[in-house]
Amino acid sequence: MTGPAGPAAPTTIPVRGAHPYDVVVGHHLGDRLAAMLGEGVERVAVICPERLEAFVDDLVDHLEDREVVVLAVPDGEEGKQAAVAEACWEALGEAGLTRSDAVVTLGGGATTDLGGFVAATWLRGVKVVHVPTTLLAMVDAAVGGKTGINTGAGKNLVGAFHEPSGVLCDLSLLETLPREELVSGLAEVVKCGFIADPEILRLVEETDPDALVPSSPVLRELVERAIAVKVEVVVADLRETGGSGDHPGREALNYGHTLGHAIERYEEYGVRHGEAVAVGCVFVAELAARAGTLPASVVERHRSVLGRVGLPVGYAGAPFDDLLAHMRVDKKARGSQLRFVVLDDVARPRVLAGPSEEDLRAAYEALGEQS
């Protein structure tokens, strides 16, 4: 990370993969958007949820003399549909967006996923800059180049790898974010602590949860650390082909997501992503303990850290067999074999392939005891 000292100075986190770009973290970063778009961009399509259209004017003020078209889409997972993507493609065609033009996403993780997918597929790929407006999107969806939409079979099953030209994590945009949405985003932050950076866990354990607000230096450090974890993993394994040795590579970022996505689908996306992931993290901790690799103290630490910030650590809202069926179509499954990212200890992730159904059921039953 580089950047001048001082709480007001933006921090630049470079992503130095095959297509280098920067993630900038700070407050009031709109004046950096034009530079991220670069020279030669004449038209910009801003994809955002309808409820955020009022924020677009501030962005447009920083786009200088570029022609701007605003594509308002449904909020949340409702926007991650093929029909919505198709409507965006048609609008891009009507606007005359060329290969030298760009897409800007303004919104949460679902909008980032959708907008990134539209950019990846329009003319086989145009430039995209992400301006995430939720904590979840800042530390997860906006970084790493994964894009996607949902189908009836599951979440994110249709997508493409398409790295952005830049990401602006403007913490001032979190000031209007409902508290429960901020808490949901902390699930992905804590996940990064468990898979790679124990300092994240220490900061959460030693900070009053009520002090984790957009202006908080601690929240900013948590955001920067979580992004740094994702960047390091993504640069080493962009397309999730595997890490070195026993490390699962980019797949490690899916910690807690296999059950989490199953819960989201069962609940018809009526549960927040971070809440589902938090439950999923406790589930795989219980699963690893039953496989004999994770100490009980680390399982309990999952419950204490996630619970401390207000995230759920138990769940009994669905029959196990229904969730198991959803998990079998998870992207990480191989044939009929389920795969889970688990821990041998904090910051020591690995893949557990083909766990017994007995262990899976027992781990799920343990969640019910905490619900």
Image (spheres, helix red, strand yellow):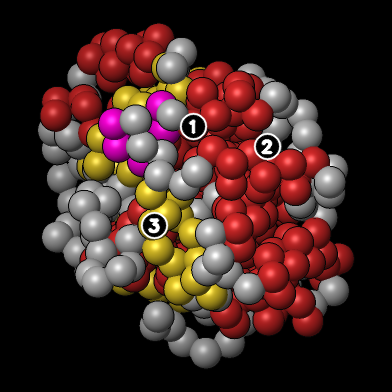
Local SS, label 1: helix
Mark 2 neighbour density, 10 Å: few (under 14) some (14–19) many (20 or more): some
Label located before the other in sequence (3 or 1): 1
Taking depth in this image into account, of 119 and 368 the one nearest to the observer is 368
Q: Amino acid at mark 1?
A: Met
Residue at x 55%, y 75% (from the top left corner): 346
Measured in 3D between alpha carbons, the distance from the residue under mark 1 to the one under mark 2, in whole angstroms, is 18 Å
Q: Is residue 46 above or below residue 226?
A: above
Quadrant in the picture for the C terminus? top right
Apparent side of residue 167 relative to residue 290 in the rendered image (left or right): left
Label located before the other in sequence (1 or 2): 2
How many numbered badges does the structure rendering display? 3
Residue at x 25%, y 64% (from the top left corner): 243
**Residue 368 image point, x, y percent:** 80, 41
Q: Which residue is mark 1?
A: 327
Q: Which residues are magenta?
A: 329-335
Q: Which residue is mark 3?
A: 351
